């Protein structure tokens, strides 16, 4: 048996705009891994691929929309969720996933995040938390751990970060999980659950950003940050969400798990999507 | 067309302007409203909250105006005729997303019922000071399409038209109403559904294949057919500068091509958009340029002027953007002087000055808070008549508001 | 490799419990040498290539002596940020 | 008929706005005139004084805002204080004698609208009684148009009550004059 | 003045434009920066995050641009010289709050390092397409003060000046930089602290008493002295239309008085603000109007034109708002034709057209993404020379961008 | 002894712009009561009155700033908190209270609310929750109970409301309470605690809005809504914040209390406020 | 009046435990007749006036027979939305 | 000296940007010239190719962007592919022989910058060695100005190392030519 077989395409290429590869992400960046998991979860979803749409904001993570070979929307910074709400309400047949960064979703987009969770609108949000604004070159954001160094916190971050699963669950999400880009199988599985869940589902994915975050915080390359996750992560699906804050300290565990899976009334304003088509066709 | 017929409240109504706009939206087939209440536009939202679900549409009250307008753009991309309504402060918050709509060529309608600004200003009182903002409020270069109703009937008619223009040009269209018209109640006649003008959005003629280029215009219109999501076109839509495939391209040449196309698609066909009404201009020596509720005051003012022996007429702008330059030029060639009457410090006046050539231009305005009194316009007309008599050459344009 | 990733196969479907053999496929030109697949393959199947690819990276290859070790757990498929590696089941079931 | 301007003034809860709407609607939809109706807005007016304006014209109503009322209806003391000075010599002033005591030398047309409504058992239709009175003492609108406007505006179940209030108001004047 | 001395990095530096702007802020005594990162302005934030705490100031990274600018206005009211920096999308989000700053007369500085728009557009590439937005982006009528640096030295100098103008006029002042200048590194000479121009904010001369009227101007400047909080003035500040006591008044007369005062306080003294540079205009037959990085290209273009025998010169606008109308008029009287060179579809050109009278105006522009090539400006100069020769009268203005 | 003594001024007038009374609030509105409690708490605060500043957004509640006779800022809709942050950071001597409505703080201003709580900046936020946008005439907002009727939810609200104490505590506030405008003594006391607390403190006050909310929901006049609070309220300082959702149902209690009082690092960027003065005085 | 408001005095300071007498002050022109003070005064001290004030409201007055009942709990002071009523301790301590 | 344009190209992490900055600084602050420096931005460049531009002029640098380089320094294969075609006949091309193999007929000036740096024990100073070489083979800047620019730019602790790298680079050429 030969060792490896050389190939020139990848099974996931079908779901990717392969003509746009290689993507812009840095070597050692975790975003590609998260996107790989998502393509896999999408394939497993019972909804036909044509009906999947992806909405991103602006940021490195926000570029995901541009690589997925589905109807995909790369909107403005922070506004992926309201855009997704418009799509979903106007055409409820769409399987709408918002895929964006921690800054996009929790800094400038934080209000939309909590309100969408409150409404319990039936969309899935995948939030890649790399602890900083990667795209703009590594500034601190609302997920940057206390004391971490970034280009705007040269003396260490004086702010305390959000605990996103806790925040989003408090706001009303019915499915909430956290994984890292190392935990690819659990992540993939959680994404699949999130896609299938009716209501607002939220998957936080911790991922290395060696260029924006690793560098300044002695985390080294992407690989080192992956080892860091390996060392510190524990899985506790039943964790008390109050207790899963993230910090820079090596002593504190990074708690992962599928934390919340419950039922609440799903937001469904009275639109009859099929009727939409009829008004469209003034000129074909 | 069943949705539309059910949506049209055919008949004569005594209805306020905001409500008429809401009914215009329904008659145009609007199925999505994303909004956030703000005086004096709130009645539009309230009406649609009640009515949209009756016709299979959805009213979503978002958490703010950023979310409102962005959800409207999302709904537009899902294929729905969609709109929002707001006033000054909310309009200012929508500026970024208006650029998104223009850049992604998402048709949608924004009704701005103008009130006194700047800032929170005069929430319940009238102004017309968002004229220039409607044109220039977002960063980068885009065109604006803005319609200005002068009556409740026009609140209905122009809202319908706004949807048709939005789909025709794949561009956000603004209905620049004002508080007086929004809060006024008048007779509104809603025609039969079949009589409501309808110009739908063009969608790709062919099913999806790998040659499909979502941002390639197939004809002189420069407007690419707009694919629906969910049916296999796999369109990528981005707010970044993009090529015909929709792929981001940080390139000056592609940028120039794109920005000019989304501009030219409107300017080239601006005659399809521009609409003005001429009132008593046949024999006029003084032309009053006015729009919105001020145009009604102007009617009274020209009557008073004529009583005093000055033949004044009105060029009422129904479209302020694209600016009716040709009509103004024609007016300038025909009258001795132009008065621009508006409830702001002289916004449209600047545009008139730009194209009026040698004809003197006099501003008649105040900052808002109440209708411009007919007497103020009358004074300007008399002043204009005076000037025009004395100095036939080009005058420096004058007005009570400061320039800058 | 310790607990965390060895637990992974637990959520595989029943048929995969027959400890399948996997075949590793590689697209060397895509690899950016992040070593995610190499360091974390639960069976230590992978290693860096001796030579560089066009971009100047040592890409992933199957390590010497590990030709039969792949269990097709798909970890490498999912973790590779560059879509440069994947595994597939070898047709004849290994049991 | 040339342009006629009407101001109705009272306090929140009296149905002033509804009355103005009905008056305008009657003229605009059922009397073949042009009419506009608007209400005063303003945070300072919250829960206190409240006013509605109706302008009726045979031709199109150009300037849509009241300049000086031809008819002023005063339904509360506060409104009286606020608006009674804002009239011309020819302004017809109507007051609800039950609620308002105006210190003025000008002739007033008055009737106990609230009392009339209370006789019908519902104080809340004082506004409609007022409209009946107004219809009788001015030539702004026809009785038929007003009745049609009431019918098409008020809740189904209250049509009868409102029409009775309208007639009572109307007759209170007709009686008085006769 | 100890804070200021410690803040001034006196000496010669090789510094990029963004950093120079940050140092300008520090030298001007800025003690508060509220920001949100955005290319190509981020280096300003990064520099100040490091430097402000060194001089006793505070850098606060807010959750978005709405919060950034509003916190800056809050800090201004607390007495601090305060600023933010952004680019197109963030600038659009600041539009509502710019109205708040104008309405409450809160001095502050906003640096907009322009990139290609509309929408997310070209984050890393240059444009100058926010010129009109800087003037008209918020609802209602306010004036704009906007300075346009052409070099890293001017990033420093004009940021200092922006703070002084902000305090002098109690108005938000915009530094309209562009990506090329923001990202360029050049020599920047920072003078001694004592040489840095400083025009401070006027505060009430008298201690608080019941006659104090926080929004009453005490002299012709029309600028009321600005009280600090915390020391007994008990000032009420509102975004609503207000009287001299600062109390909300929904009244057309008070509105007109207020809106005109906050406008006139700037236009009356616009000569104190307006700054232009004349380059080789003495003998020029063609005048090129340019600003920002384009003014540098224009230098090369006029050199090329002169090689070809066309005497071209430059009127470089250092202030774009208030628009230097007098300087343009003077230019129009002196040259045969005007070329307006800018990286947008013709924004300043419209203003030039408005005041250039009979002198032909030719636009030289593209939508951005790269510097306008010197050859493009040269072509326009040659075209202008050609036109000017043929038709001495007023020409319809021309240019490659569409109007509207 | 005489029964009542007629007076023509009120002891609180000192802290009010009495020349602006009567205020614009409707008869039966709860806002005046909440403002009365606040003036009383302010008097009890150890900080001199001159150093108190109040920041409001836009709304009926937002008018509070205009009635208090202190330095007071009536900003734009939703932005009271960032304005307050600028004030506080630039002059830490100021005792900064944000006083605004549920819509202002939790709808359009929701992002600033959670981020300020996350940062734990030393300000106090008093949020009057009247379950609707009162100022604009009674539309639904993020605090409108499920199924409640408003002018924009004529068929009953399809959205679920935020549980504000839970949300704000999750985001990071160190002091969190909820009272009603009926519980004036506890409210006053809680305001005083909030003012004295270092860090981000949050007081939610339920208050009647008969015109915007009461009317449409059969709550009658302001007085009736006060009786409604009387009937349904229970005080439970130790309540689990997850369990204190508010609903329209008469069976569900309205849980009140001083729920959270804890310590977290207070946000204090390195500004030396006293130095500020020096740069001001170019021309006196 | 039930539990809730009777508990109120519990958080008063010690000296006030001497069940002080209070004097009620009223500014009739400010009252808007909301009855908050009347319905919820823990001692039922207050009632509606017989006549109307300038705005047309029945303002709050001390009820007949309740002239000595006010305990100066300040509830009315704090609850009155119109700053139309307040209480103050009567100087001579009642014990 | 008239305007001279220099492009330095390599990959992220090589210190290309720092090198460009030092070159520009030397000219602008210590050689009495005017100089501008800028770097290419663009998301597509993330972690991959990286370039810096320096323009030096006796007069003021007007047009601040490179049009066609007089000097091109290539420090990576990818950069070579990207930029080698974008030159004029007169362009001086410098390459790091350790990293780049250019398929071109034009004369190249080359030296093993990386190797030189490795000899000094720190591969990361290859950029400074390159600057030494560049200083030697062009007349863009003086040695003194470059040394001063290095001293005032690099971290205190690394000044010596960097100066040694600079001299080694400089001498590698001086030696080669001599
Ligand atoms: C309105 C606006 N503000 C700021 C920016 C600049 N910007 C682009 S991406 C980004 C942050 C992205 O961070 P995150 O969402 O965490 O994505 P990452 O790059 O880390 O994946 C910012 C601030 C913008 N594009 N628009
Ligand atoms: C940007 C903007 N959007 C909308 C409005 C209109 N508006 C004014 S107040 C308000 C809601 C107020 O609700 P809340 O904060 O709950 O205060 P309340 O009136 O209920 O006390 C709204 C939507 C505005 N002024 N500005
Ligand atoms: S900057 Fe960070 S998040 Fe962005 S591509 Fe690079 S490693 Fe990934
Ligand atoms: S499939 Fe699993 S076992 Fe096989 S090479 Fe990949 S990671 Fe290793
Ligand atoms: S994970 Fe992918 S890119 Fe990284 S080393 Fe393995 S094959 Fe290469
Ligand atoms: S609308 Fe509601 S909140 Fe506003 S003043 Fe009236 S009762 Fe109070
Ligand atoms: S102080 Fe207390 S007891 Fe006295 S009247 Fe007021 S509420 Fe009643
Ligand atoms: S609480 Fe105040 S306003 Fe209400 S009834 Fe009592 S005194 Fe009057
Ligand atoms: Mg991030
Ligand atoms: Mg509210």
Image (cartoon, coloured by chain):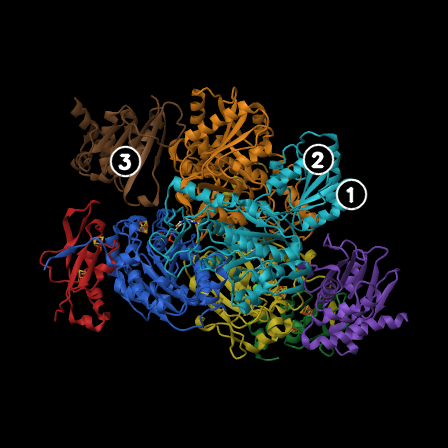
Chain colours: A blue, B cyan, C red, D purple, E orange, F yellow, G green, H brown
Secondary structure beneath dot 3 equals helix
Mark 1 or mark 2, earlier in chain? 1
Rendered-image quadrant of the C terminus of chain E: top right
Whole-angstrom CA distance, mark 1 to mark 2, is 15 Å
Residue F55 in percent (x, y) is at 56, 55
Q: Chain of mark 1?
A: B
Circle 1 Cα neighbour tier, 10 Å, few/some/many (<14 / 14–19 / ≥20): some
In depth, the one of A241 and B75 nearer the eye is: B75
Label 3 marks a residue whose chain is: H
Q: Using the rendered image, report if marks 1 and 3 lie on a common chain.
A: no
Disc 1 is placed on an element classified as helix
Q: Are marks 3 and 2 in contact (CB under 8 Å)?
A: no
Q: In the figure, is residue F33 to the left or right of H158? A: right
The Cα–Cα distance between marks 1 and 3, rounded to whole angstroms, is: 74 Å
Q: Position of residue E7 (x, y in %)?
A: 44, 38
Q: Look at the numbered disc 2 and give the secondary structure of its residue.
A: loop
Identify residue for label 3: H83
Same-subunit check for callouts 3 and 2 = no
1 or 3: mark nearer the eye: 1
Which residue was labeled with disc 2? B336
Write the residue at 37% across / 43% down.
Answer: B250
Q: Chain of mark 2?
A: B
The answer to whether marks 1 and 2 mark residues whose Cβ atoms lie closer than 8 Å is: no
Q: Residues within 10 Å of mark 2 (few under 14, many from 20)?
A: many
Q: Contact, CB < 8 Å: mark 1 with mark 3?
A: no
Query: Would you place residue E276 above or below residue A201 in this image?
Result: above
| Residue in the picture at 63% in, 40% down | B328
Residue B306's label in the rendered image is: 1
């Amino acid at each position: 048996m030969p060792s490896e077989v050389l190939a020139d395409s990848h099974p996931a290429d079908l779901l990717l705009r392969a003509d746009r590869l290689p993507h812009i992400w840095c070597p050692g960046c975790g975003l590609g891994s998260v996107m790989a998991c998502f393509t896999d979860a999408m394939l497993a979803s019972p909804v036909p691929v044509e009906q999947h749409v992806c909405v991103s904001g602006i940021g490195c993570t926000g570029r995901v929309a541009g690589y997925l070979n589905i109807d995909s929307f790369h909107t403005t910074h922070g506004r992926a969720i309201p855009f997704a709400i418009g799509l979903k309400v106007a055409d409820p047949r769409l399987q709408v996933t918002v895929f964006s960064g921690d800054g996009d979703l929790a800094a400038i987009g934080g209000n939309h995040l909590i309100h969408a969770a409150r409404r319990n609108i039936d969309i899935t949000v995948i939030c890649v938390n790399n602890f900083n604004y990667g795209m703009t070159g590594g500034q601190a954001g609302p997920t940057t751990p206390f004391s971490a160094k970034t280009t705007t916190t040269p003396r260490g971050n004086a702010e305390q970060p959000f605990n996103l699963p806790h925040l989003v669950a408090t706001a009303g999400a019915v499915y909430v999980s956290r994984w890292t880009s190392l935990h690819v199988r659990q992540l993939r599985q959680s994404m699949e659950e999130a896609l299938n869940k009716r209501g607002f589902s939220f998957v936080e994915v911790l991922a290395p950003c060696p260029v924006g975050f690793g560098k300044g915080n002695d985390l080294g390359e992407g690989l080192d940050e992956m080892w860091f996750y390996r060392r510190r992560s524990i899985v506790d699906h039943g964790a008390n969400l109050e207790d899963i804050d993230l910090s820079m300290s090596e002593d504190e565990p990074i708690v992962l798990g599928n934390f919340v899976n419950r039922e609440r009334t799903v937001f469904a304003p009275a639109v009859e999507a099929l009727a939409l088509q009829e008004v469209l066709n003034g000129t074909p | 067309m069943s949705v539309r017929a059910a949506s049209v409240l055919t008949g004569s109504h005594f209805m306020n302007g905001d409500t008429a706009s809401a009914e215009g939206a329904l008659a145009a087939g609007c199925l999505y409203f994303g909004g956030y209440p703000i005086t004096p536009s709130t009645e539009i939202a309230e009406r649609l909250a009640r009515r949209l679900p009756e016709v299979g549409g959805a009213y979503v009250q978002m958490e703010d105006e950023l979310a409102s307008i962005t959800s409207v753009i999302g709904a537009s991309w899902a294929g729905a005729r969609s709109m929002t309504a707001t006033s000054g402060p909310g309009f200012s918050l929508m500026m970024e997303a208006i650029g998104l709509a223009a850049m992604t060529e998402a048709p949608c309608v924004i009704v701005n019922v103008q009130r006194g600004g700047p800032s929170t200003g005069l929430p319940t009182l009238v102004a017309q000071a968002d004229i220039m903002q409607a044109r220039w409020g977002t960063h980068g270069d885009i065109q604006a399409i803005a319609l200005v109703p002068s009556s409740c009937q026009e609140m209905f008619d122009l809202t319908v038209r706004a949807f048709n223009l939005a789909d025709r040009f794949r561009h956000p269209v603004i209905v620049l109403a004002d508080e007086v018209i929004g809060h006024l109640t008048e007779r509104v006649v809603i025609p039969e559904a079949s009589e409501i003008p309808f110009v739908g959005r063009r969608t790709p003629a062919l099913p999806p294949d790998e040659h499909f280029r979502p941002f390639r215009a197939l004809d002189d219109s420069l407007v690419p057919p707009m694919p629906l999501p969910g049916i296999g076109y796999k369109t990528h839509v981005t707010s970044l500068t993009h090529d015909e495939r929709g792929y981001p391209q940080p390139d000056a040449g592609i940028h120039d091509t794109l920005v000019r196309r989304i501009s030219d698609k409107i300017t080239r066909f601006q005659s399809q958009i521009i609409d003005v009404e001429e009132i008593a201009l046949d024999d006029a020596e003084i032309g009053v340029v006015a729009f919105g509720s001020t145009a009604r005051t102007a009617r009274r003012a020209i009557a008073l002027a004529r009583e005093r022996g000055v033949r004044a007429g009105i060029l009422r702008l129904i479209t302020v953007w694209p600016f009716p330059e040709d009509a103004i030029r024609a007016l300038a060639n025909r009258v001795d002087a132009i008065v621009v009457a508006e409830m702001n410090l002289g916004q449209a006046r600047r545009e008139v000055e730009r194209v009026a050539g040698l004809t003197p231009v006099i501003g008649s305005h105040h900052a808002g808070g109440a209708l411009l009194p007919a007497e103020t316009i009358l004074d300007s007309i008399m002043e204009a008549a005076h000037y025009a008599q004395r100095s036939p050459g080009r005058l420096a344009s004058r007005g009570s508001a400061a320039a800058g | 490799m310790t607990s965390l990733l060895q637990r992974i196969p637990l959520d595989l479907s029943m048929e995969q419990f027959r400890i399948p053999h996997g075949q590793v496929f590689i697209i060397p030109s895509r690899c950016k040498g992040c070593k995610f697949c190499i360091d974390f393959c639960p069976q230590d199947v992978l290693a860096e290539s001796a030579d560089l690819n066009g971009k100047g990276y040592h890409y992933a290859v199957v390590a010497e002596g590990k030709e039969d070790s792949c269990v097709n757990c798909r970890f490498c498929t999912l973790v590779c940020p560059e879509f440069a590696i994947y595994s597939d089941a070898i047709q004849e079931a290994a049991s | 008929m040339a342009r006629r301007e009407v101001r109705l003034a009272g306090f929140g809860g009296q149905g002033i706005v509804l009355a103005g709407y009905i008056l305008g609607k009657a003229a605009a939809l059922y009397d073949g005139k042009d009419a506009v109706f608007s209400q005063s807005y303003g945070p300072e007016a919250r829960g206190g004084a409240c006013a509605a304006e109706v302008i009726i014209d045979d031709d199109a109503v150009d300037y849509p805002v009241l300049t000086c009322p031809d008819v002023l209806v005063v339904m509360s003391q506060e409104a009286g204080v606020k608006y009674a000075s804002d009239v011309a010599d020819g302004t017809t002033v109507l007051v609800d004698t039950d609620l308002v005591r105006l210190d003025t030398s000008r002739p007033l047309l008055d009737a106990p609208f609230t009392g009339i409504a209370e006789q019908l058992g519902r104080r809340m239709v004082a506004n409609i009684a007022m409209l009946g009175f107004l219809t009788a003492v001015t030539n702004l609108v026809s009785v038929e148009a007003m009745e049609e406007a009431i019918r098409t505006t008020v809740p189904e179940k209250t049509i009868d009550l409102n029409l009775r209030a309208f007639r009572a108001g109307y007759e209170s004047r007709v009686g008085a004059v006769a």
